[in-house]
Amino acid sequence: MHISLLFHGLARNSNDAASAPRPELMIPINEVRQLIESMLENGWTFGLPSRDATTKSRTCSITFDDGYFNNHLFQSVAHEHKIPFILFANSFNIACQVPFAWDIQTKIPAFDITSVYTNKSPRVCADLMSRDSVRPFRKDELRDFLSTGTAYLGLHTHKHHPLTLMTNAQIEDDLALNRKFVSHFPAALPDDLALPCGLYDKRVMTLLSRIVTRVYTTNNGPTTPGSSIIHRIPLVNPANYLPLPEQVARHMKTVSRWRRQARMLQLRLRLSNFPNSVIL
Ligand SMILES: [Zn+2]
């Protein structure tokens, strides 16, 4: 069995997390460390979905979306326990050095996320960019981050527009920009894409199957090893919800309930094909 965990930002401590514009996205690093160490004690191993997921053992992949500089806090845990992990980055924020739109204002226009930058005071953006706890990576920092042997860099689109609101041509253009950016860095995974806001539909998935090898959703886990679609469990700051191990357990329980229900439904359908059978 393979599960994949999704983080956004990290924080040095709970005070740093609480002072962020979106505290629910910032998880104190000690909480993450405790989760990883308790999973290791319980027999989980960590790796990349493309390389290390197996049917025989319980494997887990760690992923980060967007490109917050604070993700560097994970490196000490990753080195200590030899954990490879993937950062899925928006190239626009890193290349143009602008804060993430959802940190500038809570409600953002879905179709043109970048209009947030023109509508808001430059002072708001400058303030966010001056804070290491919420700003995106700079390119030199990202290069160092990716040179350590544990971090990999995947696609998360250029501007973080939901793909379901874009035409096929717009998606192709955006991903070409994102892939060009990612490919300049060491440890690039230019065929692994995490969906912005987790949104997709049949048209988007059909198109993506021609552009990338693996797509990462936010639809909880687990994922079949070798699959081209990796369902991730999104985790949030425990101060805003539940302790991290409980968040993981809750998602897993939901999935096993769905599976049980699906098995029951299949059984009912199979039995209903027999005219004299008893329907459960
Ligand atoms: Zn994102």
Image: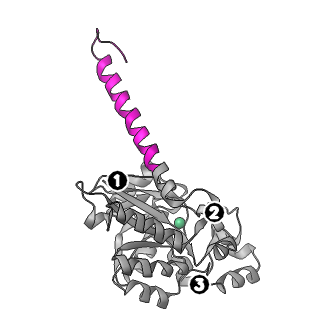
Q: In this view, does 128 lie to the left or right of 235?
A: right
Percent x, y of residue 190 = 35, 73
Residue at left offset 38%, top offset 72%: 85
Q: Which amino acid does label 2 sit on?
A: Ala
Secondary structure type for disc 1: loop
| Mark positioned earlier in the residue sequence (1 or 2) | 1
Say if residue 199 shows up in the picture: no
Percent x, y of residue 141 = 48, 89
Check if residue 43 falls in the magenta segment: no
Say if residue 256 shows up in the picture: yes
Q: Name the residue under label 2.
A: 239
Q: Of helix, strand and loop, which mostly describes the magenta segment?
A: helix
Residue at left offset 61%, top offset 84%: 132
Secondary structure type for disc 2: helix
Q: What residue type is labelled 3?
A: Gln
Cα separation between marks 3 and 2: 29 Å
Nearer the observer, 7 or 122 = 7
Between circles 1 and 2, the one closer to the viewer is: 2
Q: Residues within 10 Å of mark 2 (few under 14, many from 20)?
A: some
Vertical relation: 168 (above or below) 12: above
**Disc assigned to residue 223:** 1
Vertical relation: 18 (above or below) 185: above
Q: Mark 3 points at which residue?
A: 97
